[in-house]
Amino acid sequence: MKPLGDFQIVNHSVPRGDGIPKVTGGAIYTSDMVVEHMAWAKVLRSPFARAKILSIDASEAKAQPGVIDVLTGYDLKGLSPYYGHGVKDHPLIAIGQVRFVGEPVAAVIAEDELTAQEALAKIHVEYVELEVILDVDTAMAEGTPRIHETDFADGSFRGFDDFPGAAGNICQAVHVGWGDVDAAFAHAAHIAEGEFYFPMVYAYAMEPYVAIADFDAKGHLTIHTSGQHPFMVRHDVAHVFRLPLNSVRIIVPYIGGGYGSKSYTKIEPLVAACSWKSGRPVKLQLSVEEAFLTTRGDDARVRIRTAVDAQGHLIARQATIHLNTGAYAENSPMVCRKAANRIVGPYRMPNVKIDCFAVYTNTVPASSYRGLGGAQVTFPGESQMDELAEMSGSDPVEFRLKNLAHSGESIHPGMRPIDADIPGDIREAAKLLRMDRPLAPGHGRSVCCSASDAGAHPVTLAMVQVYADGAVSVLSGSTEIGQGSHTVLTQIAAEEMGVPLEKVRLIGSDTAVTLFERSTGASRTTTLMGRAVLEACREAIAQIKVMAEEVFAAPAEKLTEERGGLRHGGKFLTWANILEEYFKMEGCSIVGRAYLRKAGDLTLVPVFWEIGVVGVEIALDEETGKISLDSLVTIGDVGLAIHPAMTEGQDLGAATMGLGAGLFEELIYDGQQLMNGTMLEYRVPRFSDLAKNIDMKLVQNRDGVGPYGAKGGGEGAVNPISPCIANALYRATGARIRRLPLTPERVWKALQEKKGIARG
Amino acid sequence: MKLSFELNGKPATLEIEQRESLAEVLRGRCRLTGVKISCEAQVCGSCTVLVDGLPVSACTLLAYEVRGKRVTTIEGLAEESGRLHPLQQAFLDHFSFQCGYCTPGMILAAKALLDDNSVATDAEIVAHMNGNLCRCTGYLPILKAIRQAANEMRDEK
């Protein structure tokens, strides 16, 4: 393996490829785009959580000057209007029924946005309200009507990519288990048992959902979208409009944040239907308030118990997880699968029984949220680790070290063994946090960890184009969502081709140009697309080596590879020189390609274990219950950081997002109505929430299947933050809170309760 | 109605409608799409532009309010030569953005602070920047960039 010091471009914090555009205002996002002859759409949304639509009268709206057309569920003849990669349960616009407050019921297409907005008030919808089903217990109770009255067709991934399915109001059920939990609990020395709740959260990507769809005169459909999974969008849209894959072109410009919320299909089928109906290119730009009504994270109720033996070894964990999935499946079947896997934690756990249910309710559809079920279940899991440490009379760090799986050990039978040094990471976090220092009053510290089966299904195809003038283009279907993929992938190509970074250009994402990449998520891009780009470069080089035999007039064994080209005796030619000599024509280029699939060393799932290790020291204001962060430590166990500064940036960003759900963020329903769906009322972390001391450390053991031993990052630190804060709060006060967020009010009440109990 | 103001150092006269926000005029009529729209409620700071050197939320300011005033957007910050403003360079140096959607507003809000107080302490920077949200970075890289730019802007004075 190439020693770390030998890398020229990889493992260096080079300038971001998207840097200049992003600091000068030149970066164009879908929300900034206009296309020729473009019309605008606006959406009329349901005021009811569950109701039959008796009629829609849009005649007055259609008569308004400037209105081109109105789309409703009555206009979809000839289409397959239900989409979804897990379950095809989602109509592109309400058809005869609405299932949550905010569901699109009609769309006005007009010459300008204001006209479209004004015309919404002129659409008259007659509803009959039905009994609403707002929580998981009601949804699962016997006799409760079904939110979806029919069984929908499976999406392409069901039964294939870990979506076994379910029925009734249970959208998905996943059962994970091994050993004999009942026997283990019967012999336990200590058992921690409790019910935990992780709140309903909103990712708040600052650019709300936006798409421009254009059916051209030949019937080809082009969509510019803020969606982060162009190929998944293509799948859904091609299905809806019954088009071949090469008739649907999805282009993704810069994206203003995602954090899971822009994964899979959102508004694209609706916008495409507006173009299909009106014969015009149509742009739909949602407001943030509409984005609140489009996707959220699954809130989770977790009933969990965990047992240790008298020596302080974990012997069993049992949990029942109920995810409130909202009105449509979206990606919640996968959240369900991942929550069930991830609640086990990175520990040797000989007996396990996990039952996880994603449950339909009449609320905003839930889907991916950074960490995909990880944050929801690491909170209860790691809270109980501290509870058990105390019961065992052990230090929480030592207790973890005693039970953590080491590199090469398996935590899930049949899955890839752990490919990280989690005990080392925990020790490093404890060291950086200086756990041995005495605590000031109102202060508490904790170190927590998580292991997530990351990478999703490994199908990743890439091309590089090597030009005879020394330039190289990487054609990648991974989207640049801010994580820095456009930089990292060009670094890998520059490293492999031996050209300066400035010579490498990233082309993508555009489904008509770039090869298939399943998704940009599950922290997979560096690992899978990075490796595909590396292999594509090597494949291009292999082609050039064959050409070189002719150019040098020498057999392959006489040619030695040096950085950037080949040497034959005293003569060195770059790869570009060889191409030029071979074709004897300016402007030529060749294509190297790589097709990764679930085979070889990518057969075992997960692609890699994404480790989250964080430490915090909190400072509590006991008068108000307000928690602030004195110190934050993150450990990024990433195999190799292709770009160290951006990798640390991912850790801090993920930790900060976790801090939001830990301390402030919660969507609140009052009956069927979302009460705080605006940024005036939904509090996310701000500058002043920054920890006073921040230490970030990267661990580079090159133990991943990605390029040069790299693994992904960006979703690890979001998981362990909230239990870390809750554990630190317990350390500071003795109050154990099992419900997030730890708002001042909730903390203050817990403290008063504790004082009351103490007073007797 | 007619609107005359100074836009990024040059006089501008536009025909606008009375109801238009400054953000709508800058983005739609002037194609200065570095002005980003997010919360539309003066919470997130992504639409921050400078009016006579002070930061305002362009999403909720009626455009006619800037008549006769100086408006600066992110597009007007670099020198004609292409040389970046010290804040722009510092944001690059410290990887102070990921998706970049909050960045124009961040840089302009920081400029307003440093133009007024080039010896701003960390506490002053945090207090001033608290109205600009970033969902990607966790803020520390932005704080570091503002510190660096403050040093450079002081040295240049």
Image: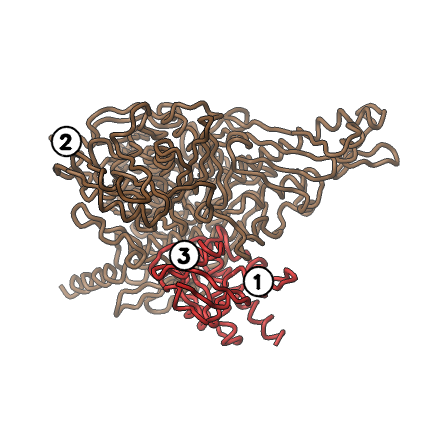
Give the Cα separation between the discs numbered 2 and 3. 46 Å
Location of mark 3 (residue): B24
Q: Which chain is brown?
A: A
Nearest to N terminus: mark 1 or mark 3: 3
Residue B50: percent from left, percent from top? 46, 67
Q: Residues within 10 Å of mark 2 (few under 14, many from 20)?
A: some
- Image quarter for residue A131? top left
**Does residue A322 show up?**
no
Asked whether B47 or A617 is in front, the reply is B47
| Image location of residue A430, percent across then percent down | 45, 56
Residue A159: which disc?
none
Position of A205 with respect to A7 (left or right) is left
Q: Is residue A269 visible?
A: yes
Q: Please, what is the three-letter code of the amino acid marked with disc 3? A: Glu
Q: Which residue bears the numbered disc 2? A: A145
Q: Position of residue A47 (x, y in %)?
A: 19, 44
Q: Residues within 10 Å of mark 1 (few under 14, many from 20)?
A: many
Left or right of A680, for residue B84? right
Q: Residue B153: image x %, image y %?
A: 58, 72
Q: Nearer the viewer, residue A307 or A320?
A: A320
The image quadrant where one finds the N terminus of chain A is top right
Q: Which chain is red?
A: B
Report how far apart the C-alphas of labels 1 and 2 lie in the structure.
58 Å
Disc 1 marks which amino acid? Ala
